[in-house]
Amino acid sequence: MTSLVRNPLTIVWAFLTTVTVASSFISLGGGAAHRINTTVTTAVLLIAAVKAQLVIRHFMEVRRAPRWLQLTTTGWVVALLALLLGFYFAAL
């Protein structure tokens, strides 16, 4: 049982679960649904990018992949975050 708790995948899974609950509370605290809150939206998108990076690295085994694949997946997450934030702020 102790080895299961110390397993890196279990730790990452627990962190992802905690961050999912936290982003849910952040979005609930953002105010009324009809009002746009840029701080809440940015925070939730950043949390989503961190979660995506953790899933890619730990559950898709990219942490053991060649360096070029690690950099490509990280670049993809960063580019997607930048694109989403760019579209969001351009639409305001």
Image (cartoon, rainbow, N blue to C red):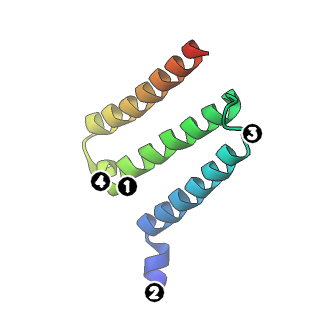
Which residue is under mark 1?
58
Q: CA distance from mark 1 to mark 3?
A: 34 Å
Q: CA distance from mark 2 to mark 3?
A: 42 Å
Q: Which type of secondary structure does the marked residue at label 2 adopt?
A: loop
Of pointers 2 and 3, the one earlier in the residue sequence: 2
Q: Nearer the viewer, mark 1 or mark 3?
A: 3
Kind of residue indicated by mark 2: Met
Q: Which type of secondary structure does the marked residue at label 3 adopt?
A: loop
Q: CA distance from mark 1 to mark 4?
A: 5 Å
Kind of residue indicated by mark 3: Gly
Q: Nearer the viewer, residue 12 or 84?
A: 84
- Residue 72 lies in quadrant: top left
Identify the residue at horizontal 48%, vertical 25% (top origin): 84
For residue 31, which numbered disc appears in the image? 3
Which residue is under mark 4?
61
Q: CA distance from mark 3 to mark 4?
A: 38 Å
Q: Nearer the viewer, residue 65 or 81?
A: 81
* Badge 2 vs badge 3, beta-carbon distance below 8 Å: no
Identify the residue at horizontal 74%, vertical 39% (top origin): 31
Kind of residue indicated by mark 4: Glu
Residue sticking out furthest to the top: 90
Identify the residue at horizontal 59%, vertical 40% (top origin): 44
User: Where does residue 40 sit, x and y in percent of width and height?
Assistant: 67, 36
* Badge 1 vs badge 3, beta-carbon distance below 8 Å: no
Q: Nearer the viewer, residue 65 or 33?
A: 33
Of pointers 1 and 3, the one earlier in the residue sequence: 3
